[in-house]
Image (tube, rainbow, N blue to C red):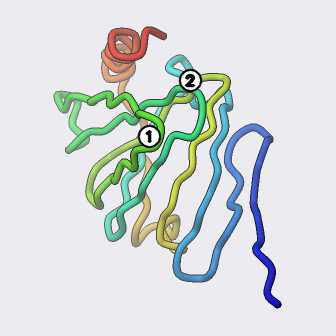
């Protein structure tokens, strides 16, 4: 008889817990790089979507349509048990509380640069505006 396999991750940051060659399931826990003071860049997937689901704690998604200094970074507070889809072509990142556990699903080759993933640093002005919005939305 086949057995059910369970996956978990309790460390800091990200662990890719399951990859079947088509899609990848990861668990992301708090790490200092995902705090409003330390996050410095956004990511984009040009050909694939990515889904997030909050399991514990608090988290928000940062998103931005373009990557010009005047483009405003949005802050979306995540609610437990809801799935949030980041569509291809949208710049994004996430911020996590110290007790956060976030699950995400993506195409197994989503991180293959340069065809799909790209990263860009936020300007100092974008970071300051983002931190202000995070404080307003999340209270952090």
Badge count = 2
Q: Which residue is mark 2?
A: 35
Q: Position of residue 57 (x, y in %)?
A: 58, 27
Residue at x-position 39% and y-position 36%: 61
Label 2 sits on a secondary structure element that is loop
Closer to us: 23 or 7 = 7
Closer to us: 28 or 8 = 8
Few, some or many residues within 10 Å of mark 1 (<14, 14–19, 20+)? some
Q: Position of residue 10 (x, y in %)?
A: 79, 42
Q: Earlier in the sequence, mark 2 or mark 1?
A: 2
Q: Position of residue 81 (x, y in %)?
A: 46, 43
Residue at x-position 33% and y-position 52%: 86
Q: Which residue is mark 1?
A: 93
* Quadrant of res 78: top left
Q: Give the quarter of the figure containing the N terminus.
A: bottom right
- Determine whether 86 is above or below 111 in the image: above
């Amino acid at each position: 008889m086949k057995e059910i396999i369970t996956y978990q991750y309790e460390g800091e940051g990200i662990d890719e817990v399951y990859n079947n060659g088509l899609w990848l399931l990861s668990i992301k826990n708090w790490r200092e790089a995902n705090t409003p003071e330390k996050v410095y860049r956004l990511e984009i997937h040009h050909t694939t979507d990515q889904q997030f689901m909050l399991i514990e704690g608090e988290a928000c998604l940062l998103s931005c349509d373009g990557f010009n200094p005047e483009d405003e970074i949005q802050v979306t507070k995540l609610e437990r048990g809801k799935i949030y889809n980041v569509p291809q072509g949208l710049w994004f990142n996430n911020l996590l509380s110290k007790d956060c556990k976030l699950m995400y699903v993506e195409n197994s080759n989503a991180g293959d640069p340069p065809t799909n993933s790209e990263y860009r640093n936020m300007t100092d002005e974008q970071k300051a505006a983002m931190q202000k919005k995070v404080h307003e939305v999340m209270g952090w």
